Amino acid sequence: MAMNLKGYCISPDDVNDAYERIVGSVKRTPLLQSTYFNQLTSRDVYFKCEALQLTGSFKYRGATNAVLSLLSSPSDSSTGDSSPPLTVVTHSSGNHAQALALAALKHNVQAKIVMPTNAPTAKRSAVEHTYKATVIPCQPSERERTASEVMAVTECAEFIHPSEDTRVIAGQGTVGVEMVSQIEGISGPGSCLDCVIIPVGGGGLASGNIMSLKSRWPNCKVVLAEPEAADDARRSWLSKEMLGHPVVDGVKTTVNTVADGLKTELGVNTYPIVRDLADEVITVSEIDILKATKQVWERMKVLIEPSAGVGVAVLQGKEFNEKFEKEQFRKIGIVLCGGNVDVVKTAKTMEDMGI
Amino acid sequence: MAMNLKGYCISPDDVNDAYERIVGSVKRTPLLQSTYFNQLTSRDVYFKCEALQLTGSFKYRGATNAVLSLLSSPSDSSTGDSSPPLTVVTHSSGNHAQALALAALKHNVQAKIVMPTNAPTAKRSAVEHTYKATVIPCQPSERERTASEVMAVTECAEFIHPSEDTRVIAGQGTVGVEMVSQIEGISGPGSCLDCVIIPVGGGGLASGNIMSLKSRWPNCKVVLAEPEAADDARRSWLSKEMLGHPVVDGVKTTVNTVADGLKTELGVNTYPIVRDLADEVITVSEIDILKATKQVWERMKVLIEPSAGVGVAVLQGKEFNEKFEKEQFRKIGIVLCGGNVDVVKTAKTMEDMGI
């Protein structure tokens, strides 16, 4: 079925341009199969291992595209050699922080990362010491304000939002570009997947790859996977209204899920793409997320974070299998979005829950 | 330095033949790099991820070569269509059991696997249900006897030893064949590694890859990595005498190490290659093995088993760095041999040990 991919914050061409821009700078991650999962689901399942991407998540694609786009933009070259160095700024406690820090380091750009004081020590240490960014600590409620202050006092500074920046969204879409090429490499030109399952949080990964996949494989269903405990995309997609996490007495609810990468909400750039072009948004429980995460650890040997387990849980759940019963999907792709996880702590949670 | 690779149980040509035989049947596993480990060691470190091999370890290479060699041998084709089906037999509680079971399944050969009753339930279940082999349970002390009985009552049966079978050894050597090709792909024709670190247990992986690496890269040092708690290869290499695990009052000591894949001893086929051609055998402590295992989990997102952590521990240890100080290795390879691990249990051990 032909689909109108125009009128959104990015176009399929933006993803193609991003791919050309970053192809030599990011890792072409493996597309793995598993005898166990093929048998379990009676399908061919292809796992796109972004946990093995540089900095441990797909976020490195978007960050790299943002940095390289900046470096090639006319406003940069017109500033001349004597201008102050470019600085990218963001606020993040997680994967985007690490991704932007390394992308900046590799391309000789300064990075200032606002990190809340409750960010895990290991992540702060990676951003600061391994990836050499300047970390500005702040109170958890002061992220936006602190980032604005950093922007105000930094010359040639560019703010790179983790999921709403269009360069970031286009960069994330390159996951799908590689999947198409890898499937054709395995099964021959013209081969395609019947369905691809993608975890959704802020929606950068989801909307970027809806663009790259739907433009190449118009008949491929794109199913978004979300934790029940952070189901804003599900509710927004169903109601066709952008609904964030619930607000109680004027205060936004703090959502709590083991899939900490998916706590963020869709934004004005990512939401329209999800609303119009996602074929389904399916939620799964915490226990199913952890079970699926453990399955991937033990059967595929890839140390995914629970956010990546969300898609694997959807694949095995009742809702997915009932909704798409008549489609009889034979070949399914799943994006294993990241691997930044405290394994000892998560293993303990699994044990406590009897998984 | 030219090196005499003749007069051993296998030759470099046997490995080349094995590679031709199995290339379409086994996975070309990724050769990964890590910013973290490069910085930590001030070197370029290349990790050959056999944890991502089918059945979760390099053992699938040797098992596949054994099965395919059997199928192409004249004795098989001369038996004609009416002969009973071929059956491969082994005894194993671990990775070889799973590898042989799947290799047999994929090539329409029967497999009978003698497994001790104390083998982990998950491994027995994988062999029996995922890989569809016949499992014959036995008391742990009765493995050899039970396997002999199975051989005696099975027509067209072939015993495939996990580390002494020459077809198995040649198959394991294909890890090195791929590493050479991958390094040339990354750094250009003629490029090489200065040193490759390989874990050693029964010695199949070690001796097969000494053959493939030394025949292609005569100047590359091959360093074997072993747990202190199961140091028969170290003692044998130092004394130039084949020493198994200690015997006390006429009874062989039971060795105990988290690197359970390395508890086995060198044998008459693998020992001479290790004795003459390994450049060093270095042992590491249990705590260093677990620390290194956790580093790889968290930094590389590959769920290795502790046996694979042994090589990573050697790389960071004092002995390796002192012994090879003057060589100034720049590019080092490490074989991450497998990923079959009870992650929850191992994570708990790490926590208990304060790692």
Image: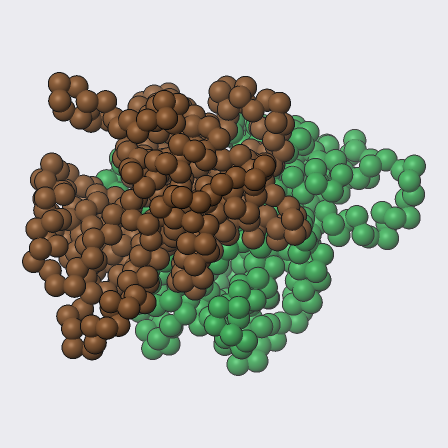
Chain colours: A brown, B green
Asked if residue A258 lies left or right of residue B88, the reply is: left
Where does the image place residue B98, in percent across and percent down from the top left? Answer: 60, 38
Say if A39 sits above or below A342 in the image: above
On the rendered structure, is A343 left or right of A323?
left
- Of residues B151 and A335, the one nearer the viewer is A335
- Residue placed farthest to the bottom in the image? B1
Figure check: A354 above or below B196: above
* Residue placed most toward the observer, A210 or B3: A210
Query: What is the tally of numbered marks visible in this picture?
Result: 0
Q: Quadrant of the C terminus of chain B?
A: top left
Q: Position of residue A342 (x, y in %)?
A: 29, 39
Q: Nearer the viewer, residue A107 or B227?
A: A107
Q: Residue at x 33, y 53 (%)?
A: A167
**Does residue B304 appear in this view?**
no
Query: Percent x, y for residue A9?
Result: 35, 46
Whether residue A119 sits left or right of residue B82 in the image: it is left
Indicate the quadrant where residue A329 lies.
top right
- Residue B177: image quadrant is bottom right
Q: Is residue B19 left or right of residue A253?
A: right
* Location of residue A50 in the rendering, given as x and y in whole percent from the top left corner: 42, 47
Residue at 44 percent across and 45 percent down: it is: A6
At 67% from the left and 32% from the top, the residue drawn is B133
Q: Above or below — where is A200 with respect to B10?
A: above
Q: Examine the rendered structure and indicate whether residue B166 appears above or below residue A329.
A: below
Give A200 or B268, whichever is nearer the viewer: A200
Q: Residue at x 70, y 60 (%)?
A: B20
Q: Is residue B320 visible?
A: yes
